[in-house]
Amino acid sequence: MGKKFEGKVAIITGASKGIGAAIATHFASEGAAVVVNYSKSKTEADHIVEQIQSKGGKAIAVQANMSQPQEIKGLFSETIKQFGKVDIIVNNAGVYEFKALEEVTLDHFRHLFDLNVLGLLLVCQEAAKHLQAGGNIVNISSIASKKAEPNTVVYSATKAAVDSITSVLAKELGERKIRINSINPGIVETEGLHAAGIVESDFRKQTEKLIPLGRIGKPQDIAPAVLFFASDEASWISGETLVISGGLR
């Protein structure tokens, strides 16, 4: 039995670590040629590529900051140069930074919106130039788009915008048979979470008490859902948002 994504080419933005890395390795394990995009973490991105290649998969690492339009164009150009086409885009690149209302500044707002919203939108715009019928876009949003928590006003707004963009573009791109869906992860154990000290914190313990399944997520909990949305099994699903949070709402 053939692999599900044999012959497909997938770009995963922000794929050097965390959820993006898990998505990249999952796609590669199912036969896709994978573009591991990174902004600054070249060593980590190269490691993911080596990991994929050591198992017989196809992958390249491409540097591009998703808040910079010319770098987004370069990402697509390099992908087509190396693999000849693009079939799947996963918009995973993003930033989270939490501030109370009185701490919100123009820099904070622009930093989050430039990458989480404008960057994602520009990637979708560029993707639309290259995707053929059957092409797929999967946006990684957040449960923050729906679960209003204090001190997340800007971050939550960016993720609500991602879900809205997903709904609108499903209608715009549908006539070309291009599908787009969104995934809203809950709190997931990533390198960023470790660096912020959250994984070992009381906040984690308190959060896990609220999660029906009793634990925070792992990147491997998110990746299979991305592959499902991009697969032929989801050929009549577009404009949807899937919450993956261990039952937390």
Image (tube, rainbow, N blue to C red):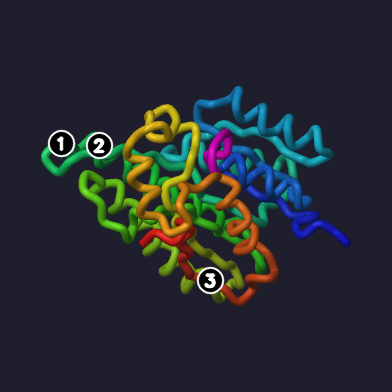
Q: Is residue 121 visible?
A: no
Identify the element where label 3 is drawn.
loop
Give, as a three-letter code, the residue at label 3. Answer: Ser
Residue at the spot 41% in from the left edge and 31% down from the top edge: 200
Query: In the shown orientation, is residue 94 left or right of residue 7?
Result: left
Identify the element where label 1 is drawn.
helix
C-alpha distance separating marks 1 and 3: 37 Å
Mark 1 vs mark 3: give the one in front: 1
Return the mark for residue 20.
none
What residue is disc 1 on? 103
Query: In the shown orientation, is residue 126 left or right of residue 132?
Result: left
Say if the magenta span includes residue 215: no
Q: For residue 67, which quarter of the picture?
A: top left
For label 2, count other residues whose C-alpha is less than 10 Å away and answer few (under 14), some (14-19) or many (20+): some
Return the mark for residue 108.
2
Give, as a three-letter code, the residue at label 1. Answer: Glu
Q: Which residues are magenta?
A: 13-19
Marks 1 and 2: CB-CB under 8 Å? yes
Residue at the spot 54% in from the left edge and 38% down from the top edge: 18
For label 3, count other residues whose C-alpha is less than 10 Å away and answer few (under 14), some (14-19) or many (20+): many
Mark nearer the N terminus (3 vs 2): 2
Tally the numbered discs. 3
